[in-house]
Image (cartoon, rainbow, N blue to C red):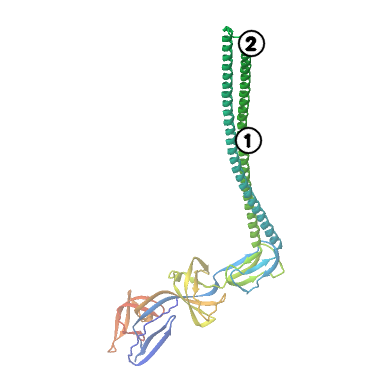
Amino acid sequence: MKAGYEMVEYHLKKIVIFSLIIIIIAGSLSLLSCRAEGGEDGLEIFEAIRGNIIQTVSTSGNVDSKYSNNYSLQTSGTVSKALEKGAAFNKGDILIELHSDRTQLLIKQAGENMKISQTSLDLAKISYQQALDSNHIAVQLAETNTRQAELASENTYKALENANSMASKSIESARIALNNSQELLEVARGSSTVTDVMLEQYEGSVESAEAAYDSAKAAGQSSKNTAEGAYEQSDMSQSTTYWSNLSSIQAAEAQIAIAAKNIEQAEIQLSLAEISYELVAIDSDNHIIYAPYDGIVLSSVYKSGEYAGPGMPAIEIASTEYIIISEVNETDIIEMTTGQKAIIGLDAYYLDELTGEIIEISPVSTNIGGVVSYKITVRPEVQDGIRLFHGMSASLDIVTSDIEDVIYIPIQSVREEDGRQYVDILLEDANIERMEVETGIFNYDFIEIRAGLSEGDMVIVSGLE
């Protein structure tokens, strides 16, 4: 573990014992400083000060791409375009492409089949609407024909009733006339005043009445027969109209059912055509590999004009969104969590520092020569003037603990005896006093003092025998 520290508050008191030594130490985030003094006996003195103390873990790593992919072709063909090694690209750019004239023709054919299927569906819908219209007309005609047949039947029935009534009246009238003529003839025969000529006249009247009666009966029967025939004909016509209407409606309904089935079949054909188009489109994608992100080409196997086959690696790429990968040993990994800050140093930019944070800690270990370590991933923050490149060397100081506003002293000034910790302090009268202290966190340079010292106490760092 490498020590590092940060002090926000700078505190300095001037104490002259023999000579003054000022030590200024540069830290990761701000200027850190402390003060030591020497005495007559060669003592190194440190003034207990208040500030911030940071505990870090140091490791090294390399700049890597956040994403990387290795692509193989899914089909064969002549290469029409291929990016070369080191080429930069943007998301959506073509990385490698094969000639696909046959595929384009298949796509065009599939597209035309979709158009034909769509047209068939449109025609089927038109036929269905026509069948609906025909059915509507058939129903209206059936209703009209039925009303007309019913009206004709009613009229012929009324005509039959009228014919029967008129025939009965005519016959009755002729019968009455016959009866009257016969009565007159009987009276005339019994009268002494009626001459033979007159009697012949009465007899002629009876004969005429009889003839008129027979004629009335014959005419009535004929009229009745004619009316009955007309009624029977209208009744038959009404029945014919019913069956004709029923047949027309059923035929129209059948046409509707057929048109509906045609629509269903046309929709299936269109769906199949769309599937065929999508399958051809998927196959066309096998001829082109697009960039999924901004990046660079790490390796490229084929060049334009070469023949490429499926299955073999064709192109390897990496994103230009960079991370830093590092291995941390098992004793330090337990101190780390995602989100912890990191101070990053790059060999290529040794005068600059970057900041970042841990975004991933692998739970899977690696064991090399008996040394167990775990991979951590750090995301660096972008800084103007610094360009990252794949594979750059980097050093990392991971901040595992950061305590503010505490009293701290050099770690070597603390001694442990019988489970207790002590420091030697220089009093104002130049005497030395041993003081028990309670410590807290520490790094390789400084240690926190939680109890036993006050700010400004002069602690002996070294020099006592």
Residue for point 64% across, 60% down? 281
Q: Is residue 75 left or right of residue 350?
A: right
**Numbered disc 2: secondary structure:** helix
Q: Is residue 152 left or right of residue 459?
A: right
Upstream in sequence: badge 2 or badge 1: 2
Q: Quadrant of the N terminus?
A: bottom left
Amino acid of disc 2 = Val
Q: Is residue 294 left or right of residue 437?
A: right
Between 411 and 210, the residue placed more toward the observer is 210
Q: Position of residue 86 (x, y in %)?
A: 63, 74
Q: Position of residue 141 (x, y in %)?
A: 60, 40
Mark 2 and mark 1 residues within 8 Å of each other at the beta carbon: no
Amino acid of disc 1 = Ser
Pointer 1 local density, CA inside 10 Å: few below 14, some 14–19, many at least 20? some
Q: Return the residue found at the far front.
A: 193
Image mark for residue 286:
none
Image mark for residue 197:
2
Q: Return the residue found at the far left.
A: 429
Q: Quadrant of the C terminus?
A: bottom left
- The correct choice, above or below, for 83 with respect to 44 in the image is above
Q: Which residue is mark 1?
A: 244
Between 320 and 57, the residue placed more toward the observer is 320
**Numbered disc 1: secondary structure:** helix
Residue 52 visible in the picture = yes
Label 2, label 1: how many angstroms apart (C-alpha)? 69 Å
- The correct choice, above or below, for 16 with respect to 128 in the image is below
Pointer 2 local density, CA inside 10 Å: few below 14, some 14–19, many at least 20? few
2 or 1: mark nearer the eye: 2
Q: Position of residue 367 (x, y in %)?
A: 52, 67
